[in-house]
Amino acid sequence: MTSLVERPPAGPAPEEGHRPPAGRPGPDVVPAHVRLFRRGPVVAVAVAVLAGGGSAAFLGPFAALAVLAVALFVLCAVHPASAAYIYLGTLPFLAGIDRDVLVPLVRPNEALLALMLAGAAAGGYLRYVRGDEFRLRIRALDVPLFVFAVLSLLWPVAWLLLREQAPDAADLAALLPVCKLIALLVLVRTSVRTTEQLLRLARMVIWPAVVVAVIAILQTLGVAPVISLLDTFWNGDGSDVAGLAERGTTTFASPIATGDYLVLALALLVALGVRHLIGRREMLSAALVLVPGILAAGQFSTWASAGVVGTSLLYQYPQLRRRVIRLLPALGLAALVGLPAFVNRLSQFGDGFAVPPSWLGRWDNLTSFYLPRLGDFHWVLGVSPNSVLPAPETWRDTIYMEYGYLQFLWVGGVPLLVAFAWLSVVVLRHARRVSADPGPVGAYASALRAGWWMVLALSLIDIHLVLRGTGELIFLGLAIVGGRADDD
């Protein structure tokens, strides 16, 4: 084949049978859509500017939001790893805003993830058209994870239809958390691969968690501007201002979600620090904020989570024991900042009850509303995708299932519970093996191993696996460890 400009021959001429068909570009002619894609950053700026002009003309005050959406879409198409960074970096501040507050039907973080997934998918398609190599390898961890996803998403709806019951909007909305977590797993698995990307992603988890810990501390210390801001956007349960000062609900709008997120972020921080993948000053400065933040969450389950995760880390890294002993004075001083919420929570044991009143309410909900509906062998195949029940009382609107293993039986019956048990065995086995890696992959595996033990222990009282924030960090670990599950 000859090009438009004569060149010296670089090798033997191709055989006649290998010539491209008439009307199709040869190897020296790059298609226009590929040339456009290669100029990704330039295209991103150009598209954003054009979209900004158009949106300003037609949308008025929504122009800035439209420009931002277009810019994010293009950025994620060009650099798909950016979608994971942005989502996890903004997650602690968006996940606590209720549905229909800023975005119809969904939480802001869910809308943001959908937008960036669309951008990453569009970019992936263009790279595929360009001819980039694309290999999808099924790993050992993917099989039980796929079974768990099917029994969490498809089986509950299918079982409703088999009983001639049409799923309503609440049933379908109850499936969104698992859909979101699976989507995040696929995004991270396909876009975050290098050591630099993994470390950058870890910092996008740790430092927003530090900010959340600061908010929890200021909240429980009664700092008025912080409480006022939380009451405006992150007070989903309608607590009064005095109630917001009792526990660290933070921008997650939940003390349980806040505490779990801080505990898992601290686990990842420690796992990175042990491998000397982050500096000692960075590790200590973040840890000295996360520890009092965990106390400021004011949640018994959070302190239990910290105990389980801490025990797992000390088992994995015996050398940590001496370091913890040396750091006890500094950690003790830091913990004093979060002490008000801790003392306030313990004082509830002295309110005339043997246990906090909230525990009695949980037990009453279980025995009065959930166990009767699980009877008559309904627990075998499940009851409904949605475990939230309307409350018969006038002082509350809804009742929540607050027992993790019963949640599995309620949603998917024994098949889902067995799938979770199978997934747990495989996750712990592979996480233990991958944690031997001296790089950031090993750090994620160590944090996942500790976090999964936390899920197993705390699922006795809550469904921590899909809790906002907690679920994202667990599935982040699954994405990274799962991608290396079969590597030697």
Image (cartoon, grey):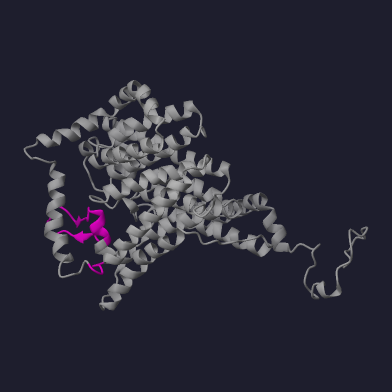
Quadrant containing the N terminus is bottom right
- Residue 49 picture location, percent across and down: 61, 51
Q: Position of residue 191 (x, y in %)?
A: 55, 52
Determine which quarter of the picture holds residue 390.
Answer: bottom left
Left or right: where 474 falls relative to 186:
left
Q: Main secondary structure of the magenta part?
A: loop
Residue 202 visible in the picture = yes
Decide whether residue 454 is among the magenta residues: no
* Magenta-highlighted residues: 380-408
Of 394 and 248, which appears nearest the observer?
Answer: 248
- The verdict on residue 400 being magenta is yes
Identified at 52% across, 50% down, the residue is: 83
Q: Position of residue 419 (x, y in %)?
A: 34, 62
The location of residue 100, given as percent across then percent down, is 34, 56
Q: Is residue 97 above or below residue 152?
A: above
The front one of 9 and 95 is: 9
Residue beneath the point at 23% across and 32% down: 342
In the image, what residue occupies the spot 87% across and 64% down?
3
Quick check: 441 above or below 246? below
Please name the residue shown 28% across and 42% down the image: 255
Q: Is residue 471 left or right of residue 31?
A: left
Camera sees residue 386 = no
Looking at the image, residue 221 sits to the left or right of residue 478; the answer is left
| Of the pair 242 and 181, the residue shown nearer to us | 181
Task: Count the labels in the image.
Answer: 0
Q: Where is residue 370, by image quadrant? A: bottom left
The answer to whether residue 366 is above or below residue 170 is: above
Image position of 398 (left or right of 431): left
